[in-house]
Amino acid sequence: MYCIRSIFTLIKRHQPITAIPKINILKTSFKSELSRFYSKVIEDESDNIINELCNGDPEQEKKLRILMLEVEVMRQDGRCAPNILLSKHWQHLMQLETRNQRTKYLLYLWKTEKSKENQKAKKEARRKQLEEMPPEANKEYPDDITYGISERSLFLRIRDQSINNFDNYRNLQAIIHGLPIVIDCSYEDYMVYREAVNAAKQMTFLFGDNRIHRDPFNIHLCNVNTEGSFMKQLEKNIPSLKESWFPLNIHTKSYLDIFPKERLVYLTPHCREELTKFDYDAVYIVGCMVDKVNNEPLSLAKAKRDGIKMAKLPLDRYLEWAPGSKKNLNINHMIPILLDLKSTGDWEFSLRHIPRRKLMETKILAMQKALKNTQLSKDEVFNNFKKYSNLKGISSFKNRRSSSRKSLYDDD
Amino acid sequence: MFCTAFRIFSLQSRPHKLVSRNVVRVNTVIGKKHAADQLEYIKSAAEENIVDWSEVKKNALSIQGSLNSKNIDAVLLKVMVNVRNFDAALSFADYLRDTNSELSLGSINSLLLLYYQIGRTEKLTDDQKKFILDTYKSLYDKYTVLDFTTCERLLHALCVIDEWKKAFKVLDNIFLSCKPSHSAYSTLIATLFRCNKKNEAMKLIEQSVSNNRPLMDGAYEAWINYILRKYKDKKTILKYMEDILIFISDNLTKVNAETAQKIRHYYSSHSWDVQFTKIRKSDGQCMKCSETLDPLQLTGEQFKMLQENVKEKLIVGSNLFLKTSPDELNRFLEFLEKTAPYDVVLDALNIAYAGKRGPMDRYRVLNYVVDYYSKMNKRILLLGRKHMLRWKNHQIQKLMNKTCSFFTEDLSQDDPFFITAAIWSGPHTDIVSKDLLRGHMFLMQDEKLKLIFRKWQWQHQWMVFINKQGRIILQEPLRFNPYAQKNNGSWHLPYETEDVTDAPQINDGVPDLSKWLCLRYKPVR
């Protein structure tokens, strides 16, 4: 059943006109027709893609043909590869160097394809369910009035567009009166495609979070590469980004050309200086970078090279971090922290934007849960604890906290 | 405290993980996670004697999962091969060939896999051999180039029927999409030895090693068998067997336990005294034969290569500002010019932080180490960061009187500096640090350079440990070459096993000295 349905969808996608006569054939002599049908479609399509991507370059064509074969074998082998690949996907696949990278990318595409399929199926089921549901409360007499929101309501409907305009208005005010903040987008070369897309997503969230705040920042994107995948993705997320009225400053210039150097402060987790309070005269710079692959202290190097001041958030003073959590924050956590800090000056309150999973309290809860559900006996747990733990030299959080307050990076 | 408790849990679950890892290794080729129920059914179904394969297929497809009509054939076959149910697999293969006029690529691949696995232990029938050859021909007729998976399967299958010339062509094809796997190289090498093509085999071995694909057990086995088959005279056999050992020592590889067993078996049957042994850490003495391993040495040329590369690779790298600044680098270079050479370079912060009981303890450890070397009249360079200058009671100033000293900025990294200082100072300079320097070794990029760095590190690195009583222990550098070698007519080979020990251990940078093979010639009386 599933397989017939998948053929249906395939037919719908590729040959909408010839679909109807083919179904009958498929139902009767299902197997032999099946294999031919697949190969035929793929050949037609693949030739088009090869022409489009390779421009007659024989080396490229060879590579692409091998890739196509690789994917086809993966499909038939039971490994995870999507059924439909567009030419942009092939282009990305060609750029990937190792087989492992390709497999991972294909798995990602396969998962998206499946989740779309599932969503569609769910929607279909819901639709059917709605059709079968009895119509709402029968009227006793034909001229009865039905009450409720769907019929009549006291209030005017507020549309999304109005909300959008309202938020943008506040953002426009910030452009005139608000404090400037710089998002440094110069790290795109150090990110892989996936990270650039993630960064664009964070940027989108950040834009939204900023404009719904009571007193938003005037955001400047600096060092923007307009051709890069970050900007392309951001445009996809915010279609009106390039309109002249759009309340966001986008510069291809460096922040050094826009603001006086003395006022700039680079916020980087790699430096030793801690930010103690919000300086209303300073222009803070936040690096827009997802550093899952590349762990080098790039923002530190950049600030050092430009010779501007650096600071990091006093994360250790106010929060107890779980072991192993990284202290580099997403930009869409960073900006709300600064927003709150600006308006309240309260660090404890501002740092609530840090994801809870990075903190010790979550670890303790998880730990308690694990202890509750463990199959080991109590003695075993204690024995293991004695065996593996090195309790010497671990001071309590309180002590650590006081020492970190005393000095920032002296050793004693 | 909680972090340690967490570790206990993770350690507890480790045995399970190990078990499941083994299972996954067999099934890597199937997206197991997404079709668990279906695979479960197929496995249980394969154990019964089945005649009606269409029924099995239909049932498997009716279960929810990622298997569909397109990949079910290949997966069915692969699952049966993986659980070594060859009878069922063969019957399904017949079914496939009967029902389909044209096999799909996926099922061809699985059939090749099946024939390879069968062919490893028994002879294939003519029909099966013909299938492999026909497949080879038809695949290359249809597609001029093949993808990685098909190539690998085809190569393995061709090797089973000793068609090494064709396998070579397939091997070349693999390079179009990626590097061939360990198994592809080793299988082909084994086949070449089986077909008595030693010259080709040796060439391919060289290629395999240079592509970072050390030989697997099968290749060594075939090599040994080839020698035993070809030569009858005992002395010539011994001479050629030694070639294998020379190959191992030249390439600085470790053989795995099975190969070690085979070598042991051969040599002990030829009146050699072969024993598993351990090497003593302090001086490199073999515990069985009391022979001492050769001292570790870098040639002048190798050391020069290291000297030329170390600054560029470790300090400058892709961006000078990541680790230091131009001013600081110049300051450092001037300093080196003025004060070099040294006998020993101390990674001050690393040594100090071996002391875990506060600032006084840190000073105690560092002071102990400095005194240790100054008593030996060594010229010492103390390398730290500037914040050390603010230690209380002018502790650091006291140390500075006894040593040369250089302090980097707080924002700079000090490790690259102390390594560079030591290497530039000359081939006799030692370093003191508990750091294993793996990250820095990686930055050397070039495989050859990495190895030289590794050797240099073994040769010169002292480490500071503190035992439970609080006593400071200085671990000396390695005095001997930890690779396979011949000393006074006897051979010593390291080997590796796959087992993982559960107990936590301190990694002190010394290679495993407990798994060695000692081969000694026993004169016949």
Image (cartoon, rainbow, N blue to C red):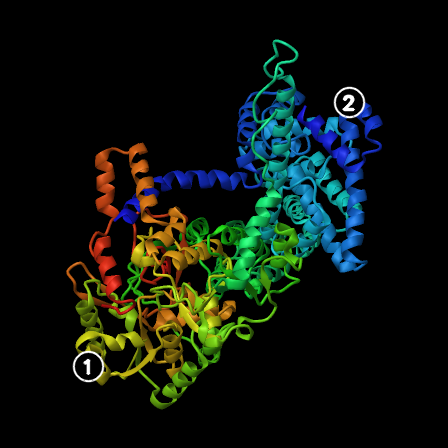
Residue with the mark numbered 1: B398
Query: Badge 2 local density, few (<14 within 10 Å), some, or many (20+)?
Result: few
Viewer-nearest residue: A170 or B519: A170
**Does the image show residue B214?**
yes
Q: Splitting the image into 4 quarters, where does residue A410 fall? A: bottom left
Viewer-nearest residue: B444 or A320: A320
Residue with the mark numbered 2: A27
Q: Chain of mark 2?
A: A
Q: Residue at x 69, y 26 (%)?
A: B95
Viewer-nearest residue: A330 or A38: A330
- The residue type indicated by label 1 comes to Lys
Query: What's the mark number on residue A189?
Result: none
Rendered position, A190 above or below B156 = below
Q: Residue at x 80, y 58 (%)?
A: A55
User: In screen coordinates, is B223 left or right of A81?
Assistant: left
Question: Residue A194 location, x and y as percent?
Answer: 57, 53
User: In screen coordinates, is B203 left or right of B396?
Assistant: right
Query: Badge 1 local density, few (<14 within 10 Å), some, or many (20+)?
Result: few
Q: Chain of mark 1?
A: B
Mark 1 to mark 2 CA distance (whole Å) = 92 Å
Screen quadrant of the C terminus of chain A: bottom left
